[in-house]
Image (cartoon, rainbow, N blue to C red):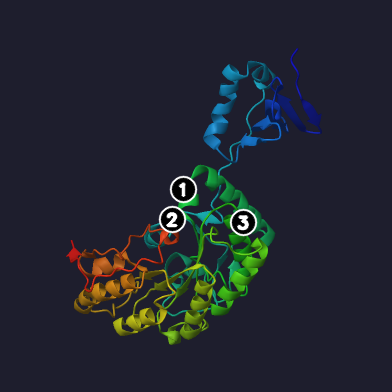
Amino acid sequence: MATYKDWTRGDEQCFTSDVGFGPRGDYYHYVMVKGGKIVGFGEEQGNYAGGIYSSPEFNTECFKHEKERLKTQYPELYEKIKDIPLAKIYKPADKAIYQPKGKAGEYAAWACNFYTGCSNDCQYCYCKRGVLSHVWSTTPQLKKCFKDTDDAIATFRKELDYYIANSSIKSRGLFFSFTTDPLLDETGGLTVEAAEYAIRKRVPVQILTKRADGALRFVECLSQMLGGIRPFHKIAIGFTLTGFDELETNASLTESRIHAMRTIHALGLRTFASIEPMLDLSTTEDIINCTLGFCDLYKIGLLSGGKQPIDPKNLFSFIPNITYKIGNAGAKVYWKKSISDLLDGAVYSHPAAVDDDYDIFSINRQWPHNSQQPFNPFML
């Protein structure tokens, strides 16, 4: 005789297939209904495993087809739920998480923005121009699509869960942020809360800041929230290092940022430097010399808009020497598209020179390139 574990609680119902019994306990498939609509398909496997495996928020393709699968594999369960409609499939509005386009897309495949505006007040900031100029302020403002910070983090979690199930975000990681410094006093709280959730979900996190104090505070808070930072926690902290403090009015001094990078790297976290805009070759080389040994990746690009201060002829000889130096220290460098564009499409080839999709968490810190000279020419 068939046995079922159907139940009803308020507007929630659970319909099950015939209950079987194995060495680990009861085994059956079930369908969850709420408000008259199917909200989940699940299975129970005794004390081994179980739970919802398909819902309107996750595995959406599976959710659309699961009802038909029950028709052939569990017909008695299908008969119970055949006339119950599926809940509306969740589609994120990309309020918090989105895929950057254009030049931002060169920097990260996935990004999160909670705020617009930044108190660093950098003179060269691209956000002061273009589409964000009309909402830009030196006081960070929570984006208008969020009711409050609680709504912002709830939206973030829902969007991240969806993208984990339906995209490449677990392999490509999540970047904070393009429309503010994510580690200001005003923005750091949401950043650390979101980063903790992402890391627990095994989503790599990369954060770019000009705040030395904010970066150290972030690492301390995150470590407490996670019960310690472990090697499998994929976290990378980056610092913008142009070397021109006078253009970065309220940011931490370059010296402080470098010291914070050294401290964070010593804790076992990945670190990277964003040298963009590169305003002077000599200053850039000084920054690299000061950070070799505790910076895993350098991202180097040119000024966006305005008169270009870098001479292409000097840049052409600068790139091989710097790439060799970085590679010999066991680090990597990404020369951004703006560099190649200035050099009429030339791209320098070297084991230490990587593309925009390079995974910072795959770097082998023990690898030094031992050749005595840069060995590959530019390639067109």
> Quadrant of residue 284 in the image?
bottom left
Q: Nearer the viewer, mark 3 or mark 2?
A: 3
- Whole-angstrom CA distance, mark 1 to mark 3, is 17 Å
Residue visible at 52% across and 69% down? 180
Drawn side of residue 342 relative to residue 129, left or right: left
Going from N to C along the chain, the mark reached first, 1 or 3, is 1
**Residue at the image position 55 percent from the left and 43 percent from the top:** 91
Element type where label 1 sits in the image = loop
Q: Badge 1: how crowded within 10 Å, few (<14), some, or many (20+)?
A: few
Report the front residue among 268 and 171: 268
Q: Nearer the viewer, residue 45 or 280?
A: 45
Q: Which mark is residue 197?
A: 3
Amino acid type of the residue that numbered disc 2 sits on in the rendered structure: Ala
Q: Quadrant of residue 4?
A: top right
Q: Is residue 102 above or below residue 55?
A: below
Q: Report the residue marked by disc 1.
A: 168
Locate residue 175, reporting x and y percent.
49, 61
| Mark toward the start of the polypeptide (2 vs 1) | 2
Instruction: Please identify the residue farthest to the top as the structure is shown.
Output: 1
Q: Give percent across and percent down for residue 24.
A: 70, 30
Q: Amino acid at mark 3?
A: Tyr
Residue 187 in sight: no
Q: Please name the amino acid that badge 1 sits on.
A: Ser
Secondary structure at badge 2 equals loop
Q: Is residue 204 left or right of residue 284?
A: right
Looking at the image, residue 62 lies above or below residue 105? above
Question: In which quarter of the view is residue 162 placed?
Answer: top right
Q: On the image, numbered disc 2 is attached to which residue?
A: 109
CB contact under 8 Å: marks 2 and 1: yes
